[in-house]
Image (cartoon, helix red, strand yellow):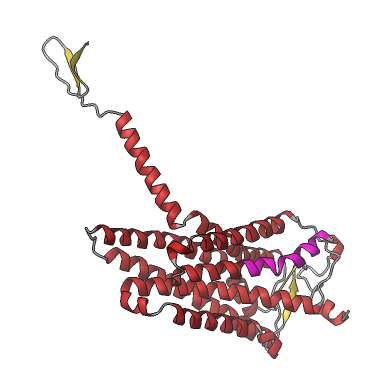
Amino acid sequence: MNSGWLSNGTNNFSHSNKTEETISESIIPPTLQYLFGVLGNIMAIFLLCKTSSKHKWKPFYRLVCCLAITDFCEIGFVYPAVMVRYISRFTFIFPKQLCEYCSFWFSFCFMSSALIVTAMFSYRFIAVRFPISYQASQRKRMNILLAVIWILSGTVSSLNLMGVGSVKNFYPGSWCFIDFANNGQMERLNTFIYSIIEFAILSSTVVLNVAVVYSICRKPRFTASNKSRKKKGDVFIVVFLFAIVTLFSICWVPLMVRMLINASTGNPKNGPDERLAVRMTVSNAIVDPWVYIILRKENLVKISRWHQRIRSYCSKRTPEIYIMKETDKTGTINIGSNLSNNTTTVSL
């Protein structure tokens, strides 16, 4: 194995005075991430296929399915190598080829997921504001859009293979990513390119989210039953998208901030903070399918109906009581109820 790779990669931690044997990290967090990530994305894909007769693979649902597939690849293709590192008690060292493989899948899936989420908001915005254009842009344009997303993500994720930057094995030696803990000119350039593109995607997603919510709130309230159902369908989708963009922002910002800080400072770090930022970004791929499973339109409709039934049941079981106080000279209060014509007299 190339000793130069080891000296510049795996063992090049910010706390260089510590050796591989002193690393002590729990295997529980990555294990839970792997199990919930794989299980959640498989369940989401299964539910999408099972209910295909209802949604008929409209653009929004096709994007949700592609998001679940991308998130599954992010967890399923990379985490086995991560688990080997933990199981070996950090004695297994990533070869350069394996590190480049893991780095590519991480960066590719990160960017693909972000672009797919942005595409979901774009299609929702077009559907609300320009319904005629939305109907005309079904399958053909969707296929072109997905191809552009994957080509762009693959190109940006492969810049290190073209000589722009390099990959690095980060603390605790269990994950690889583009080297944003290096003062090299090409490494900084690669870091800035990736982080700025991701920030642009995040900003666009937030703006589109606000535009979609604003457009739906401005839509007139129809009295016709079919249009009323359509209005409710928009609300359900907005609830799902709002949850997605909130989690997307929370999970993504830490890694982008760490990348920009490391690329801008003269003393880049490679330690627990970077590992935590990546774990949060990976958590987005784990949480996304569970958000869909819980906030599916069918589930929200059921929750809404249950809520209405509970309210109706409680209103029947708890009669409305009207209390009328009438004090006379003898100091008595008459209490009347709508359930009975009887009057109870309470002496003071």
Where, by quadrant of the figure, is residue 219 drawn?
bottom left
Q: Looking at the picture, how far across and down is residue 133, in whole percent? A: 34, 79
In the picture shown, does residue 325 fall above or below 59?
A: above
Q: Where is residue 73 in the image (x, y as percent from the top left)?
A: 65, 69
Q: Is residue 228 left or right of residue 143?
A: left
Query: How many marks on residues?
Result: 0
Residue sitting at x 78%, y 76%? 98
- Prevailing secondary structure class for the magenta stretch in the rendered image: helix
The residue nearer to you, when weighing 53 against 89, is 53
Q: In this view, does 346 lie to the left or right of 121?
A: left
Residue 177 in view (yes/no): no
Q: Give the range drawn in magenta.
A: 72-87
Q: Does 205 sit left or right of 73 as displayed?
A: left
Asked if residue 297 is among those painted magenta in the image, a careful observer would answer no
Q: Residue furthest front?
A: 53
Q: Which residue is drawn at 58% across and 76% down?
A: 111
Lateral position of residue 306 relative to residue 217, left or right: right
Quadrant placement of the C terminus: top left
- The relative height of residue 50 versus residue 7 in the rendered view (above or below) is above
Q: Residue furthest left?
A: 329
- Regarding residue 193, the answer to whether it shows in the image is yes
Q: Is residue 86 magenta?
A: yes
Taking the spot 60% from the left edge, 71% from the top edge, the residue there is: 70
